[in-house]
């Protein structure tokens, strides 16, 4: 319920993507928001107001001239009462109206009369999207501080393939949740590692661990929500990439090391969340190792570079935060790692039920001691950690 208490005015304009707005209303309500739908006349030709009324539990406004609205000031009241005005889908025509400040129907009028932030999810044909007039209008809206969500690329209703599709309802909800997070890392660059590494023994086998990447991806999303420019270096995981994040996929610790060292010097923050293999086979066999029926093969291991320690040892290092997963003696082992790697903060988690859960129990360790956080979903903990990192950056 990440939008509990938020009042969203949802403007729906005419386009085939209007059907996706119905799912959007359902998802917004599921996240705890109250949704007031306002439709343009064109939108009502694609989906009826009754659909939105049933999903939002509120009457849908379509007309500037509704006599039942007290004092006939719906255009002012609807945007006064909202925490955000979201227009999804926004047609090319409506984008043009917004850019030019037109107010010739209820939705454009309440948009012009709003005092709340405006988010717009464009949906149109590829040619309309790439038309210089639309691009000019979008640039104007961006300049006016409007958040533009998407569009996405893919199959279009007209049969063409390309940019212009409205982003999916789930993505719009994620963008809205992100929009409401405090921008404590605005303008900062944050690099992090996530997931396991895989150290090859032969072409089909290797040494790895069960890190799912969930904690690291939650941190990446929380950092992006907080306004940071995020680069995520991750080992083999099957997590979807949060929108707006630069993702670099790697397999081995050596590849992770190389990717991190390419970017580390220019970052404000580095977080090592990955469960990096400390050792790798000294050589990986060129072909699959066969059983000879006599003896088990011996695998010689050599040490991998310590990525976090190397970043912390840069001449002007970013603020470095480590993670420590332990099955016992968490405080002792975590503090030892923090001191050995010369980092100000390490985040400890006791691994009682293995990796991969959606929730976590974290304890922060620094030079002053320890601070346990209340067990919570990984994304919520990640957001708390971003607030902590922002404070550390301020006091650096
Ligand atoms: O991915 P999930 O399933 O959500 O699980 C998350 C997690 C449990 C993997 C994560 O929360 C976590 O604790 N990651 C650190 C795991 C660990 O104990 O790492 P370590 O003790 O090997 O390393 C300590 C720190 O040094 C870590 O920040 C690690 O990224 C870093 N390190 C370690 C070795 C190495 N060669 N290079 C490194 O940078």
Image (cartoon, rainbow, N blue to C red):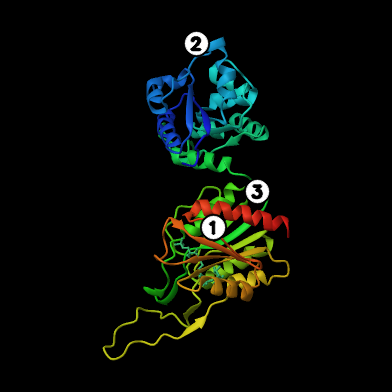
Q: Residue at x 62, y 22 (%)?
A: 112
- Seen in the picture, residue 369 relative to 336 is either above or below; the reply is above
Q: Kindly report the distance in space between the C-alpha atoms of the residues bearing marks 2 and 1.
A: 51 Å
Q: Is residue 82 above or below residue 349?
A: above
Q: Is residue 230 visible?
A: no
Where is mark 1, residue-wise? 373
Relative placement, left or right, of 155 versus 101 is left
Seen in the image, is 21 located left or right of residue 270?
Answer: left
The part of the image, by quadrant, that contains residue 316 is: bottom right
Mark 1 within 8 Å of ligand 1, using the beta carbon: no
- Between disc 3 and disc 1, whose residue precedes? 3
- Name the residue that disc number 2 marks: 66
Q: Is residue 246 above or below residue 313?
A: above
Most foreground residue, 113 or 201: 113
Dot placed on the residue nearer the N-terminal end, 2 or 1 = 2
Residue 20 in view here: yes
> What residue is at 42 percent from the left and 72 percent from the top?
208
Q: Of marks 2 and 3, which one's residue comes earlier in the chain?
A: 2
Q: Residue furthest bottom?
A: 294
Q: Nearer the viewer, residue 279 or 129?
A: 279
Say what secondary structure mark 3 lies in. Answer: loop
Most extreme residue toward the top, as rendered?
67
Q: Label 3: which residue?
A: 184
The image position of residue 23, as x and y in percent, is 40, 34
Q: CA distance from mark 2 to mark 3?
A: 43 Å
Where in the figure is residue 322, as x and y percent of width and height?
Answer: 58, 66
Depth order, front residue of 296/308: 308
The numbered dot on residue 281 is none
């Amino acid at each position: 319920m990440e939008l509990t208490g938020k009042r969203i005015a949802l403007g729906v304009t005419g386009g085939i993507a209007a059907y996706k707005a119905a799912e959007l209303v359902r998802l917004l309500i599921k996240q705890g928001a109250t949704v007031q739908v306002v439709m343009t006349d064109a939108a009502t030709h694609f989906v009826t107001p009754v659909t939105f009324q049933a999903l939002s539990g509120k009457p849908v406004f379509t007309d500037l001239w509704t006599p039942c609205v007290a004092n006939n000031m719906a255009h002012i009241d609807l945007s006064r009462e909202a925490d955000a005005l979201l227009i999804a889908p926004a047609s090319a025509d409506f984008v043009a109206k917004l850019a030019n400040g037109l107010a010739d129907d209820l939705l454009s009028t309440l948009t012009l009369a709003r005092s709340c932030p405006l988010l717009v999810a464009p949906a149109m044909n590829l040619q309309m999207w790439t038309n210089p007039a639309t691009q000019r209008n979008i640039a104007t809206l961006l300049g006016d501080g409007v958040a533009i969500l998407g569009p996405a690329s893919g199959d279009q209703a007209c049969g063409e393939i390309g940019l212009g599709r409205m982003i999916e309802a789930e993505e719009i909800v994620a963008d809205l949740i992100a929009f409401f997070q405090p921008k404590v890392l605005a303008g900062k660059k944050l690099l992090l590692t996530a997931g396991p590494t895989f150290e090859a023994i032969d072409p089909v086998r290797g040494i790895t661990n069960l890190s799912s990447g969930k904690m690291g991806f939650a941190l990446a999303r929380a950092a992006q929500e907080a306004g940071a420019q995020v680069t995520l270096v991750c080992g083999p995981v099957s997590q979807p990439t949060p929108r707006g994040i630069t993702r670099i996929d790697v397999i081995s610790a050596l590849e992770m090391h190389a990717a991190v060292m390419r970017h580390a010097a220019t970052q404000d923050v580095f977080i090592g969340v990955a469960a990096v293999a400390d050792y790798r086979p000294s050589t990986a066999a060129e072909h699959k190792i066969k059983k000879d029926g006599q003896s088990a093969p011996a695998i010689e291991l050599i040490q991998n570079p310590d990525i976090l320690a190397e970043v912390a040892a840069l001449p002007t290092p970013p603020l470095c935060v480590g993670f420590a997963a332990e099955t016992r003696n968490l405080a002792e082992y975590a503090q030892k790692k923090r001191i050995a790697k010369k980092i100000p903060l390490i985040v400890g988690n006791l691994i009682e039920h293995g990796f991969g859960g959606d929730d976590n129990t974290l304890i922060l360790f620094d030079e002053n001691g320890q601070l346990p956080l209340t067990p919570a979903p990984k994304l919520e903990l990640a957001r708390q950690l971003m607030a902590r990192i922002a404070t550390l950056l301020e006091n650096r």
